[in-house]
Image: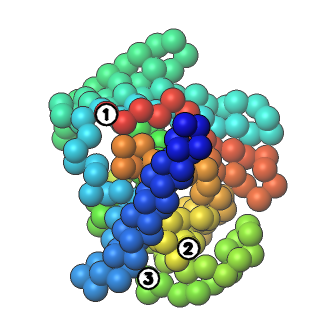
Amino acid sequence: MKKLLLVALMGVLFISCNDKKKEQEQIAKDPNLKVHEKIAMANGFEKFDSISMLKFTFNVKVNDTLRSERRWAWDLKNNKISLTEKDSTMSYTKKDSLTKEKEYIDQRFVNDSYWLLFPYQLKWSNADFSEPKTAKAPISGDEMQMLSVSFPSKGGYTPGDSYDIYFDDDFMIQEWVYKAAGGGREMATTWEDYENFNGLKISKMHKSEDGNFELYFTNISVE
């Protein structure tokens, strides 16, 4: 009986892997999709509209010291966003005008959700994209496909920022370099520890080359 169960389980895993491979191949070969759209789709973009609630905790650790820990709950049906930080919970509904208190939450939500859902921002935002090319990734040194993403110089909380994203043959981001507007600060981190949450493929860990900076997500829930 145990052998039959093991064989059945292996069969399910084999079918699942084959389905995933076919899905990735379809995305890669789709002539109607641009490269940035393929990255979004490979991460489950088409599943996003079907979810009603997204929860996650945004964590930043520097030199083994936890600097930030923000717990988020995003009610997508009502566009209500709640932040729990230091045992205090604040909420707001996204709209055109925000009070100073609500702007405080919104600014942090935009930052934290960009890290969580950046592949989807490639579809949602009005960014400019370079032509993809082969380049060495900044941390691993591996040759990957690289795409530069530039955001408008006006509007938003960090106008003019740009990113060089390095992705594999399955259109999954493996590393990126953040570049602040005006030739300012640059930071390279990994994209690793991917997990599938009801169709949303999320990288839970981002590290600097020396490992002294870690930005990671815990308590992820997709309903």
The residue at the point 59 percent across, 43 percent down is 3
* First in residue order: circle 1 vs circle 3: 3
Tell me if residue 175 comes above or below residue 204 in the rendering.
below
- 7 or 117, which lies in front? 7
The residue at the point 36 percent across, 57 percent down is 44
Q: Is residue 16 visible?
A: yes
Q: Is residue 105 visible?
A: no
Q: How many marks?
A: 3
Quarter of the rendering occupied by the N terminus:
top right
SS at circle 2: loop
Q: Position of residue 97 (x, y in %)?
A: 21, 36
SS at circle 3: loop
Q: Read off the residue under disc 1.
A: 223
Q: Type of residue at label 3?
A: Ser
Q: Position of residue 11 (x, y in %)?
A: 48, 55
SS at circle 1: loop
Q: Is residue 69 left or right of residue 8?
A: right
> Which label number is shown at residue 168?
2
CA–CA distance between discs 2 and 1?
28 Å
